Image (cartoon, grey):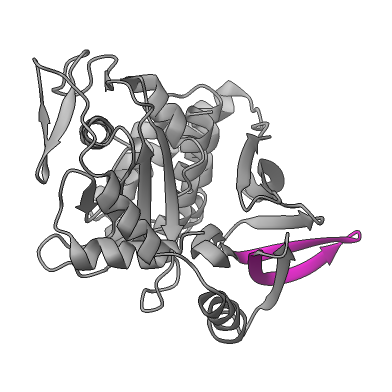
Amino acid sequence: MINKRLLIKNLLAHNDENSFYDKKRFISIGEKEGKAKFLKHVCALANSNPKNNSFIVVGVEDEDNKIVGVDFFDDSKIQNLVNAYLDNPPLISYENIPFPHLLEGKVVGLVTIKSNGKVCALRKNIWKYYGGAVFFREGSISLPKAFGIELKDINSKKVATIEHHARNNIELTLDGVIDFINYRHADLTSHYKVFKEQFVVCWAGHAKKVKGETYYSRVDIELINEQVKLFYSALDEVSVYYDESSFTTLEYVQLGLGKQQKYYPLEKVTITFMENGNYQMNSELVFEPPQYDKKTLHHIYNSNSALLQKLKNRINLTPAEKKDLHFLPDTYLICYLNGFEEAKDQMELARTILKEQDRGLYETLKLSLRILRKVKYN
């Protein structure tokens, strides 16, 4: 079992960017250029490593390898994105790896890419890359290759050595549990559960009981053995269920127009642990978006757009407009879920404006964009 934090440290300490490893300050798959560049690197790393894993580490400064972290990113639909744009797509996972010195909510992203042994290529045009393009790694650069396409295994021994040095042990596991419960989450209700005598899951949050059910807010869930953050949210409500072989979370999101808010089940994630030391994670989107009258939503959409324009122009808002602004992320999301496709562009515009002017509302907007991404790639 690989400790992913140790794996990242080994990659950063012993290797510059090369044909099986890349590092990024951040990735942006919410717009075409960022999505295209990400797919190019995935394609190149898969083709350059047909028989071993390759990696992208996200949240690291390029010049000095300083670990600065990125926001928690939910990868549950990232495989769908890769499948949609690549022929012979690799298996891909995005894991959130906590580091002790990072701020709450910040992690290092670890993208693991496993080739299927066939030449991977772009399926269709995206940004400035044409459908049919094939990429390979030459040192630290992902380049197109138009002739002499042949997959060569040159990195298996190197990667196997790095992964071997990142193996977990009992000391690291115990230290991880103690740190999670006694230090990082001393102010929260914390629990741990051992599965199949080898996997340890820890979870913490503010617990409350409603009609016999326990719900958690400000939730943090980690698979300690691999140092992987499975879930993090300062806003959502989550319920937790487990038996001897599986651990399940059901996430709820609060949505509504104005003060008429309700909780809606969003996604169910189940981790099934097996006797042979492996586990499988299955996510199921169970979200049924609320539907509203189109005329009402047209009015709200136009009001939101006017508010954004005022903020952009640094015009002071009235008290009533400030109240409406508080619900802007939710109402834009509801508009999108009810067929207003242009609401996504407005949310991206709001991201830029709110990041400078209202950090609290900016965090709420990021949650709305996360829900939108889940629905889009489902």
Using the image as rendered, state which of residue 362 and residue 126 is in the foreground.
126
Side (left or right) of 233 relative to 121: right
Residue 115 drawn at (x, y percent): 35, 32
Residue 117 drawn at (x, y percent): 34, 26
Residue 377 drawn at (x, y percent): 48, 29
Q: Point out the stretch of residues depicted in magenta.
A: 199-219
> Magenta part mainly helix, strand or loop?
strand
Residue 352 visible in the picture: no
From what the image shows, is residue 375 above or below residue 6?
A: above
User: Which residue lies most toward the front here?
Assistant: 157
Residue 139 visible in the picture: yes
From what the image shows, is residue 142 above or below residue 131?
A: below
From what the image shows, is residue 183 above or below residue 76?
A: below
Residue 121 drawn at (x, y percent): 25, 20
Q: Residue at position x 17%, y 18% from top? A: 133
Q: Quadrant of residue 354?
A: bottom left
The C terminus sits in image quarter? top right
Whether 209 is among the magenta residues is: yes
Side (left or right) of 131 relative to 334: left
Q: How many marks?
A: 0
Q: Quadrant of residue 289?
A: top right
Q: Residue at position x 24%, y 30% from top? A: 47
From what the image shows, is residue 376 above or below residue 26?
A: above
Using the image as rendered, state which of residue 324 and residue 184 is in the foreground.
184
Whether 179 is among the magenta residues is: no
Q: Residue at position x 21%, y 68% from top? A: 13
Q: Quadrant of residue 7?
A: bottom left
Side (left or right) of 136 relative to 352: left
Q: Residue at position x 28%, y 59% from top? A: 59
